[in-house]
Each structure stands twice: as C-alpha cells, then as structure tokens.
Image (cartoon, grey):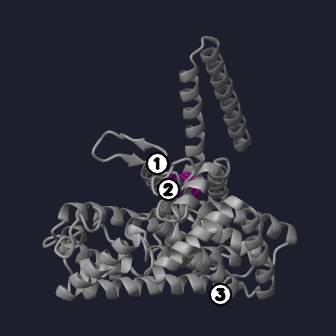
Amino acid sequence: MLSYKLQDETLLISLVAGLLTLLLAGLLLLFSYQLAFVLFFLTIVAGVFAYFCFQHPWLMLFPITIGSFLGALYYFFESSPLPVTLFQFFLVAGLLILVLHAFYYKKFEIRLTGLELPVLILLSLIFISLVYSPGRDAGFFNALRFVILLIFILYIMNVVQKHRHALYILAGLVVVGVVLSAYSVAEYMMNPQIAIENILGAGASLTRVSAGGLYHDPNRFAAILFIPAAATAAVTFSNLNWKYRIISSILFVVLLGGIVASFSRSGLISLVIIVLLTISLTKQWKFSFVLGTLAFATVLVIPEFRSALLTTVDRIYEVAFGTSADDSAGIRMMLAIAGMNMFFESYMLGVGFGGFPERFTDYFTLQQSVGVNMPHNVTYKVMAELGLAGLLLFLFLFYCVVKTGYAAFKQSVNEYQKILYISLLTALIGYVTFYQFYGGALTDSNLMLLVGLIFAGNCLFTEGVKS
C-alpha cells in the first residue's frame, strides 16, 4: 500500500513540476524573453537528460562521442590559453555522473583492460623522457591529453553494460557522419567552380571541402567518417534483411562522397583498407564485386565526383612513384628522413616525448619544409621520441588491441554483434593506416573510442553478457 502511495505522490509532484515549467516558459515567451526562454528550455532538457544519465551512465556516451565528432564546432572559454572542447566538457560531466552513480548505488567494481602494466611502463617512459626532451612543454601537454584519453577508455569500459549499448552509440555516429558528409557533398556539388579550379590546378592546387569548413583540415574531416563508413560497410556486407543492406549501401555512398570531396589521399587509402577488411571478414565476395562496381559507376557518372576521385587517385600515384609536384609529398619525405635519423642517433630511449619538432631543424630548415615540423607518421614519431623501448611497447599494445577486437568478433553470437565488432575492428585498422600519413594518433579521441568499445565488448563476453 505504501508503494502505491509513494508512486502517486511522485506522479503528482512530476505533474506539478511540469505545469510550473510550462507556466514559466509561457510567461517568458509572453514577455518576449526569447533568449531566457531558450536557456530555460535547454536547462530543463539538460536536467532531465542528466537524471536519466545518473540512472544509466552509458547514455552520456552519446553527447561525449558526438562532441568528439563536432569538437571544432564550439569551444568553451575560447579566448583562454586552454579552450575546452565539447568532448572534454561532456567527458568531465560523464565522469562526475559515473562517480555519483557508483556512490549512490554502491557499485565500486572497476573493469580493467589487463594491459595496465605495459601502459604504465609506456607512460613512465613518456614522462621520464620529458626530462631530456627539447620540446618538454608541448610534450607534457600532449602527455596529459594522452592520459585523459586512457581514462576515457576505462570510462567506456565501465559504462557499457550490454553489447547493444555500443551498437546504439555506433548508430548515433552513423547519423552524425552521414549528415556531415551529405552537407559536404552538397557543398561540393553546388559549387561547380570548385571542380573547375581543381581541374585547372592539375592537382597542384586544390579546393577541398569539409562540411562547410567545420574542420579546418579536410584530412581530419575524412578521418571522422571512418567509423560511420565501417559501420555501413559492415551492414551492407552482412546477412541482414536486404532492405537494411540497401539503405546502408546508400549511406555508405554518401560517406564515400564526403571522403572523395575532401581530396584526402590518406583518407581514401584508409577507406579502401576498411572495405577490404570488411569483405574478408564477412566473405561476401560476389556481392562485394557487384556492389563495388555499382558504387564505382555511380561516382564516375557524376562529373564532380569523377573529377575528384581521379584527381585523388592521381595524387596517390604521383606520391607513390615520386613524380608529384605537390609540396606535401616532399615534406612527408623530409619528416620521415628526420625521424629515422633521430632514431638511429638515440635508438634506445629516443629524443624525448614532444621533441621531434625541435630536433627536426637539425636535419632540414623550416624553409625547406614550408614551416612544417610536426611528425606525419605515428610509427616514426614513437621511434624518434621514445626509441626502441617505446616502439616495442607501442607495437605490443597495438597487437593486443587488434587481437582483442578479433576475439570479440569471433565470439559474436548473432549478426548484430558481428556487425558491431567488424565495424570497430576495421575502423581501428583504418585509423592506424591513416596515421601512417598523418600526425596526432595518440591524442585522437575517436581512435580511443574504438579501443574502449573493443575492450568493453571483450569484458562483456568474459562476463557472459549476450544481449
């Protein structure tokens, strides 16, 4: 009887609170306080969402991951020395909610990856190397960012309680990725002048689009599409109902268009790797040939994308065979040579974390590299800055993550789980491929998201969770 009374009182309080909220909102609109109304409405929505997140902490992964995708859209305290991104803001909020949830429900169990010892050794090496690093300030800042992302991995592992939670997050990122890619495709197709300028530039000078300039670097924009592309490719080559596969293939073509319009060579190469891995894991050889032919024909039929695709492929060919007039190819070669020289001169412990840019000028001038001195390859960055010890630790951890992802795929008991873990594994390989041509792997929140979801899935399988 008491329980019914308590439920009735809760319902009455909720109704009264709802009516008062509507009354206050109506008064704000009546007296033309539009800004106050918007802020009030957002506060109510945020409060309700925070309440649900307190009960189900995994829900915070939605704003965290979407904030990671849209990190360049808005900064808190933008004029300060340390602007806060949407990702960082929501991650702190998520961690706070998780701690409150743990104390309220007395749930103090913590899932771990099992790789804490090698990770701690790597972190020790990073912070010790700062003592002799010529770029210790930047190195220390990036080391802290790396630590935060390691905490992010543990956060994901401890909030994801079911396989479908990860699947929902993946679906949300597909929606965001398709919207951004569609916007980028429309931006490119609505401006034929871009295609004309790119044709006249013959690949030496390109106008590249990235969702209305949301991303200053089109390569970064191409990279955020790897996760949605991997997910749509996994559904397309799955054994689900044909209608879902057809819808997914259409979404994949939209994402392909976004990557092609960015003219990102590393992005296109990574996407090819993702697709080939997906086909090899699903073994849909005949269907992949038919679909690939149709997708290729679709791109060739549209003049703007035919030009973009051929230009990008031509740039890849020129870089591979050393005939490129593009400065970026020569700059990447300089960076690679400098990185190898740093490794051979300090092969055991490296030049120190964050020291690559400072030591680069020992081998080439900034005039030769057009002002570029940041490493564009995660492998030779680790080799140069942390030496052989750091490289072996890095390769061991990478091997363990890939092995764990593949094990999760093999343990999948239904088609949805196969789609999930194929998506995570292929996207991970895609990112690692991308970071053989670009810098910033250790501070990429999207890459760490994949690692976190892979280990979360492994823990769920270990615990016997099948849903």
The residue under label 1 is which amino acid type? Answer: Leu
Q: Quadrant of the C terminus?
A: bottom right
The kind of residue tagged 2 is Ser
Answer whether residue 344 is magenta in the image: no
Q: Is residue 159 above or below residue 214?
A: below
The amino acid at mark 3 is Lys
Q: Which residues are magenta?
A: 55-68
Q: Nearer the viewer, mark 1 or mark 3?
A: 1
Say above or below: 408 vs 141. Answer: below
Give SS at disc 3.
Answer: helix
Displayed quadrant of residue 224: bottom right
Location of mark 1 (residue): 86
Mark 1–mark 2 distance (CA, rounded to whole Å): 7 Å
Marks 1 and 2 in Cβ contact (< 8 Å): yes
Residue sitting at x 67%, y 28%: 18
- Which residue is nearer to you in this view: 403 or 10? 403
Q: Residue 462: percent from the left, percent from the top?
A: 58, 82
Above or below, comparing residue 209 to residue 382 in the picture: above
How many residues crowd mark 1 within 10 Å: few (<14), some (14–19), many (20+)?
many
**What residue appears at the point 80 percent right and 64 percent down from the top-left corner?**
247
Q: Residues within 10 Å of mark 3 (few under 14, many from 20)?
A: some
**In this rendering, would 237 be left or right of 129?**
right
- Quarter of the image where one finds residue 41: top right
Which residue does the numbered mark 2 point to in the structure image? Answer: 68
List x then y, in percent, for residue 221.
52, 59
Q: CA distance from mark 3 to mark 2?
A: 29 Å
- Return the x and y of residue 423 as percentages of the image width and height: 63, 74
Magenta-drawn stretch contains 58? yes
Which of the numbered marks, if any, corresponds to residue 410?
Answer: 3
Mark closer to the observer (3, 2):
2
Q: Are marks 1 and 3 in contact (CB under 8 Å)?
A: no
**Among all residues in the image, which is located at the extreme right?**
242
